[in-house]
Amino acid sequence: MSPTTSAPSRTVRIGSRKSQLALVQTHWVQEQLQKHFPQHTFEVHTMSTQGDIILDVALAKIGDKGLFTKELETGMINNETDFAVHSLKDLPTNLPEGLILGCVTERENPADALVVHSKHKDKQLDTLPEGSVIGTSSLRRLAQLRHHFPHFEFKDIRGNLNTRLAKLDEGGYDAIILAVAGLERLGMGDRIHQIIPAEISLHAVGQGALGIECRAGDTEIMEVIKALEHSETAQRCYAERAFLRELEGGCQVPIGVNTKIENGQLTLTGMVSSLDGKRFVKDSVSGAAETAEMLGIDLAHRLRQQGASAILEEIFVEVQRGS
Ligand SMILES: NCc1[nH]cc(CCC(=O)O)c1CC(=O)O
């Protein structure tokens, strides 16, 4: 690849979490940028985030946005790093003053995957026995699976991907739900037993894409990271993030999405569910891909009118009570 710019050489400092998945993702970004900008040196600075440290509390109860990103953001604000690589789904929709989402990379399959214990290797969601214990720590996965499979039991599971797979293999669960993208990136695609169709479970906002965050106004860095932007993924994710931003109100809620772009038309499907999966609203909007954010906001307003506001209010009260 030929150098994209003739800017003078400099050292670019990349902030990353330390988890295996985070490092695989960050090293991919580092390698790609090094090819585009051979005159620069790209260094990786790793940091632990609160989300890596607090492992024994259900994520839904922590409810804090930016659990996996805050320390990386402080690094950029204090000028200790120049940009940070995140799984886009872990990046809050509202960023701290002075930081922006500077690049969205090409998305992997954004779907969720069923990973089963070896004793169920001939089973899928439809055939797992009544009472099967399914591990997930995501309210979104929980609500949608409860809706379709009320005969399962659901149990929280935390830790990085390897920890979760070990907990499954040790027999603590009959099956667990993980993102296809994370398993693929770690070379563990062979553990995917079933890719869960969108009709059963809509994926998380931004799932499967990487988001690169940088200082607003740092045009030199913005120009560097833009080399990895995938415009179709970016438009889809801007629609998804606008939808989420318009709906969430200070706590985690079961919200799922699906997007596609065909002939320049972006279709966004979204759903909001109660925690028990009994009540949910789902709808779609389509329009020019360039109007991604407006489509997200439009769908959020439509769902609010169809009952999402009442569902969100009820969840807020339940979370405040600590149920
Ligand atoms: N919150 C955990 C998380 N953040 C990003 C991924 C990997 C998938 C992705 O990049 O979207 C995962 C694991 C999972 O959901 O199974």
Image (cartoon, helix red, strand yellow):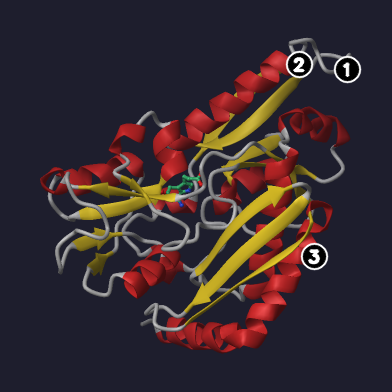
Which quarter of the rendering shows the C terminus? bottom left
Residue 46 at x, y percent in the picture: 53, 33
User: Is the residue 189 above or below the residue 300 in the image?
Assistant: above
Residue that mark 2 sits on: 37
In the rendered structure, are the residues bearing label 2 and label 1 in contact, judged by CB atoms less than 8 Å apart? Answer: yes
Residue that mark 1 sits on: 7
Q: Which residue type does callout 3 highlight?
A: Met
Residue at mark 3 to residue at mark 1: CA–CA distance:
36 Å
Residue furthest out toward the front:
263
Residue beneath the point at 79% across and 10% down: 2
Residue that mark 3 sits on: 294
Out of 269 and 34, give the one closest to the viewer. 269
In the rendered structure, are the residues bearing label 3 and label 2 in contact, judged by CB atoms less than 8 Å apart? Answer: no
Q: Which residue type does callout 2 highlight?
A: Phe
Which quarter of the rendering shows the N terminus? top right
Out of 163 and 1, give the one closest to the viewer. 1
Q: Which residue type does callout 1 highlight?
A: Ala
